[in-house]
Image (cartoon, rainbow, N blue to C red):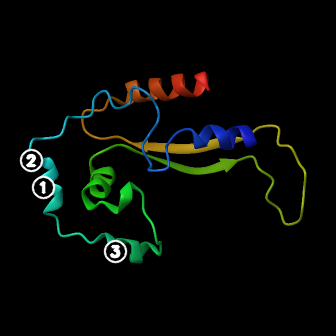
């Protein structure tokens, strides 16, 4: 279980940037005016934080970076771990097998087969 938790923790950094080499290969470069387009969007980071019930967000609370990471760049979400004993009471059960579930949201131009290959290669190297 600790090994799986460690492995899952290596997939993204503290700002939710995906750390798997090669997946960014096919992401389209920024348009010359794209940063300006995001800056003009009527979006309040403080309102978003209040809606989520949090005090801090990744990306230094920069609206443009936040929106780009939500809409423009791929993202990785960890959904759970299967195989852990979760009944009430203290147990020291070592599971025979554990499975980590995660998914990646791809963006236009990304090839799912290439991304899958990069993920498998990365995890096998770890």
Q: Residues within 10 Å of mark 2 (few under 14, many from 20)?
A: few
Residue to which mark 1 is pinned: 37
Q: Earlier in the sequence, mark 2 or mark 3?
A: 2
Q: Secondary structure at mark 2?
A: loop
- Vertical placement of 123 versus 12: above or below? above
Which of the two residues, 94 or 69, is positioned nearer the viewer here? 69
* Alpha carbon distance from label 2 to label 3: 25 Å
Q: Horizontal and vertical percent for residue 65?
A: 29, 53
Which of the two residues, 78 or 3, is positioned nearer the viewer here? 3
Q: Determine which of the numbered discs, if any, sits on residue 33 in the image.
A: 2
Q: Residue furthest front?
A: 60
Q: Determine which of the numbered discs, if any, sits on residue 80 in the image.
A: none
The residue located at (25%, 38%) in the rendering is 108
Q: Secondary structure at mark 3?
A: helix
The residue located at (35%, 43%) in the rendering is 74
Q: Is residue 51 left or right of residue 6?
A: left
* Alpha carbon distance from label 2 to label 1: 6 Å
- Vertical placement of 120 versus 40: above or below? above
Residue to which mark 3 is pinned: 46
Q: Quadrant of the C terminus?
A: top right
Q: Is residue 107 left or right of residue 9?
A: left
Q: Horizontal and vertical percent for residue 34?
A: 14, 48
User: Would you identify the image quadrant in which residue 113 lies?
Assistant: top left
Q: Horizontal and vertical percent for residue 120?
A: 53, 26
Q: Residues within 10 Å of mark 1 (few under 14, many from 20)?
A: few
Q: Residues within 10 Å of mark 3 (few under 14, many from 20)?
A: some
- Vertical placement of 64 versus 108: above or below? below
Q: Earlier in the sequence, mark 3 or mark 1?
A: 1
* Alpha carbon distance from label 3 to label 1: 20 Å
The residue located at (52%, 22%) in the rendering is 121
Q: Badges 2 and 1: C-beta atoms under 8 Å apart?
A: yes
User: Would you identify the image quadrant in which residue 1 lies?
Assistant: top right
């Amino acid at each position: 279980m600790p090994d799986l938790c460690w492995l899952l923790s290596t997939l993204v950094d503290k700002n939710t940037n995906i750390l798997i080499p090669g997946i960014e290969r096919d992401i389209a470069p920024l348009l010359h005016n794209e940063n300006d387009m995001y800056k003009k969007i009527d979006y309040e980071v403080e309102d978003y934080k209040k809606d989520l019930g949090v005090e801090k967000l990744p990306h230094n609370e920069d609206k443009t970076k936040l929106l780009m990471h939500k809409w423009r760049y791929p993202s990785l979400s960890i959904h759970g771990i299967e195989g852990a004993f979760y009944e009430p009471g203290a147990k020291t059960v070592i599971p025979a097998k554990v499975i980590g579930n995660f998914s990646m949201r791809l963006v236009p131009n990304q090839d799912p087969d290439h991304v899958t290959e990069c993920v498998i290669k990365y995890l096998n190297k770890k």
